[in-house]
Image: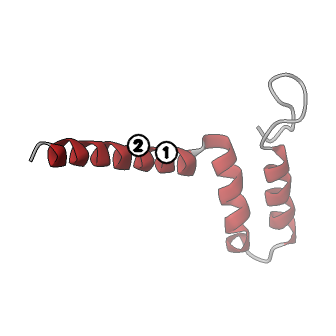
Amino acid sequence: MSSGFGVKGGQGRCFPFWMDFAKCMSDADTPAKCTLQREDYLECLHHKKELTRLKRIEEERMRQKHAAAHAGGH
């Protein structure tokens, strides 16, 4: 996590995002100015935006498959 150490002893994958966020917070007048850096760090940790996008892609693929199956039969 923010310690900077990865699972295998090297630098953690999200450490650069943490450093950007921490630098922004130390330089910013208000925390609201660091919203983008915070989002980047949290996305690196949890992949919520990526997983949401993959879910939508899969749903659209299934919708198209379903539509093609029904269109081919009529």
Q: Secondary structure at mark 2?
A: helix
Colouring used for the render: secondary structure
Distance of mark 2 from mark 1, alpha carbons? Answer: 6 Å
Asked whether 74 or 40 is in front, the reply is: 74
Q: Residue at x 87, y 71 (%)?
A: 27
- Labelled pair 2, 1 in contact (Cβ < 8 Å): yes
* Residue count near mark 2 (Cα–Cα under 10 Å), binned few <14, some 14–19, many ≥20: few
The amino acid at mark 2 is: Glu
Picture coordinates of residue 47, whole percent (x, y): 60, 44
- 68 left or right of 8 in image: left
Q: Secondary structure at mark 1?
A: helix
Picture coordinates of residue 54, whole percent (x, y): 49, 45
Asked whether 10 or 38 is in front, the reply is: 10
Q: Is residue 38 above or below residue 16?
A: below
For the N terminus, the image quarter is top right
User: Would you name the residue on which mark 1 appears?
Assistant: 54
The amino acid at mark 1 is: Leu
- 71 left or right of 9 in image: left
Picture coordinates of residue 5, whole percent (x, y): 86, 32
User: Would you name the residue on which mark 2 appears?
Assistant: 58
Q: Residue at x 80, y 65 (%)?
A: 25
